[in-house]
Amino acid sequence: MRTVEQNAFLLIIILISLAFAWLLWPFYGAILWGTIIAILFVPLYRRLLRSLKGRRNLAAFVAVLIIIAIVILPMTLIGASLTQEAISFYAKVQSGEVDFVRSFRQVHDVLPGWATDLLTYFGVASLGGVQEKLSAGLVAGSQYIATQALNIGQSTFDLIVNLFVMIYLLFFLLRDEATLSKRIRDAVPLRAEQKQDFFSKFTVVIRATVKGNMLIALLQGTLGGLIFWFLGIGAPLLLGVVMAFFSLLPGIGAGIIWLPVAIYLLASAAVWQGVVLIAFGSLVIGLVDNFLRPILVGKDTKMPDYVVLISTLGGIATFGLNGFVVGPVIAAMFIAAWDIFTASRQRVDGDGTVR
């Protein structure tokens, strides 16, 4: 009878938890980033707490102000500038000031024979075909922009609400971090050593994914945007953001942006700009990953590149832009959970007792 009652109570807990998750789903992005930022800035909060002699409210308030100043406000300004630049770039494409077909022709004319044969093999050597594909893309882009323009008021309101929820939640996550951490640990039905391993790996994964990979992507995108601006290339902020996006994908990297731009510069007789971009991309942007990743991410948390790529793309497809973080975190926790499970079974004797 007790087993039936326990199973029934467990079912009730699961149903209520699912209902609560469904209730919070509209704000999952704000909750996700509030939690991630809290995990990253807990050391700052603890230092402030010691400096302010244990006044938790004041320490959390000061920490939130610092986070707003160094993280949230700059990202908001960058987002606004990016939107402005994207609209301006799109207008230039529509007016013909930016002509992809002409640029393709210039690059095509200076390519060696084996490269043009390769383009022919993939069916992109025909200028007419390129123009047709670009026109279709521009039509789809114009439809998307028109749809977004109609909903911009509602989107702005949703952004403000989610930002408020994130900051509000962040304050309490920092202030009550010790209590919340203990309650979560006590509620998880695992053995003590399993809890320790699991939560330790979770914290390390968050640090590696956000503080490591995201910072490296941000740095590479910033360097790319600066060199584009220095060389007088249009839409440097937009190109820098796209470069940061691709730098998160192993096997692709930021070179997929700066290398074609450098080839275009060489093909359009801007030789010194193309040479500078190739040198800067190879010696500065390319080496950032090699030098900083072992320091910020660490070797113990490095997942196989194919897992990172698939989980990132899958996360983006499922969760949108938040999938940059959600996908790799889920993949890393999947691997960590199975590692802990395997290690636990290896500690069990043949008679079922734990060593």
Image: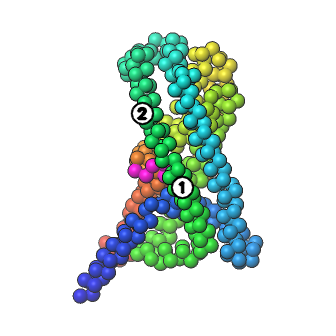
Quarter residue 122 falls in: top left
Q: Indicate whether residue 55 is drawn in magenta.
A: no
Magenta residues span 318-322
- Which callout, 2 or 1, points at the residue further toward the start of the chain? 2
Residue 178 versus residue 322: which sits nearer the camera? 322
Near mark 2 (Cα within 10 A), the count class, few <14, some 14-19 or many ≥20, is: few
Task: Give the prevailing secondary structure in the magenta stretch.
Answer: helix
Residue at point 52%, 16% (across, down): 102
Q: Indicate whether residue 321 is drawn in magenta.
A: yes
Q: Identify the residue under disc 2.
A: 140
The image shows residue 259, relative to residue 119, as above or below, that is below
Q: Identify the residue under disc 1.
A: 157
Type of residue at label 1? Phe
Which circle, 2 or 1, is nearer the viewer? 1
Query: How many discs mark residues in the rendered view?
Result: 2
Relative image position of residue 71 (x, y in whole percent): 65, 54
- Relative horizontal placement of residue 233, taking residue 20 as reference (left or right): right
The image shows residue 200, relative to residue 119, as above or below, that is below
Quadrant into which the C terminus falls: bottom left
For numbered disc 2, what is the local secondary structure? helix
Near mark 1 (Cα within 10 A), the count class, few <14, some 14-19 or many ≥20, is: few
